[in-house]
Image (spheres, rainbow, N blue to C red):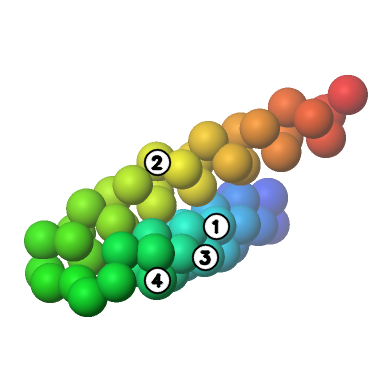
Amino acid sequence: MVRALAAGGELLGWWAALTLLWILLIGPVDTLEWVVGAGAGLVAAAAARGARRAVGDR
């Protein structure tokens, strides 16, 4: 249970940071850009977590 919460927290942290970075780099944003940014942030967060786990498990 603790591992699942840690994984969820890590994914949430990556997602928030990457979505914020997307929004900052886009400039003026509307609703569609928020949705696309959040989706791209989620995909990138999953990739970042997977990459960190791949390197950390060695």
**Depth check, front residue: 32 or 54:** 32
User: Is residue 6 left or right of 35 when viewed as pictured?
Assistant: right
The nearer-to-camera label among 4 and 2 is: 4
Q: Residues within 10 Å of mark 4 (few under 14, many from 20)?
A: few
Residue 1 seen in this snapshot: no
Distance, label 4 to label 2, CA atoms, is 18 Å
Distance, label 4 to label 3, CA atoms, is 11 Å
In this view, 1 is above or below 23 = above
Q: Say which amino acid is labelled 3.
A: Ala
Label 3 sits on residue: 17
Label 1 sits on residue: 14
Residue ID at (53%, 35%) = 47
In this view, 51 is above or below 39 = above
Q: Give the mark nearest the N terminus, 2 or 3.
A: 3
Q: Give the mark nearest the N terminus, 4 or 2.
A: 4
Q: Give the mark nearest the N terminus, 4 or 3.
A: 3
Q: Quadrant of residue 58?
A: top right
**Depth check, front residue: 12 or 18:** 18
Distance, label 2 to label 1, CA atoms, is 10 Å
Residue ID at (19%, 72%) = 29
Distance, label 1 to label 3, CA atoms, is 5 Å
The nearer-to-camera label among 4 and 3 is: 4
Label 2 sits on residue: 43
* Position of residue 36 measured from the top left corner of the image (x, y, whole percent): 22, 53
Label 4 sits on residue: 24
State if disc 2 and disc 4 touch (CB < 8 Å): no
Q: Give the mark nearest the N terminus, 2 or 1.
A: 1
**Depth check, front residue: 38 or 7:** 38
User: Is residue 37 left or right of 1 when viewed as pictured?
Assistant: left
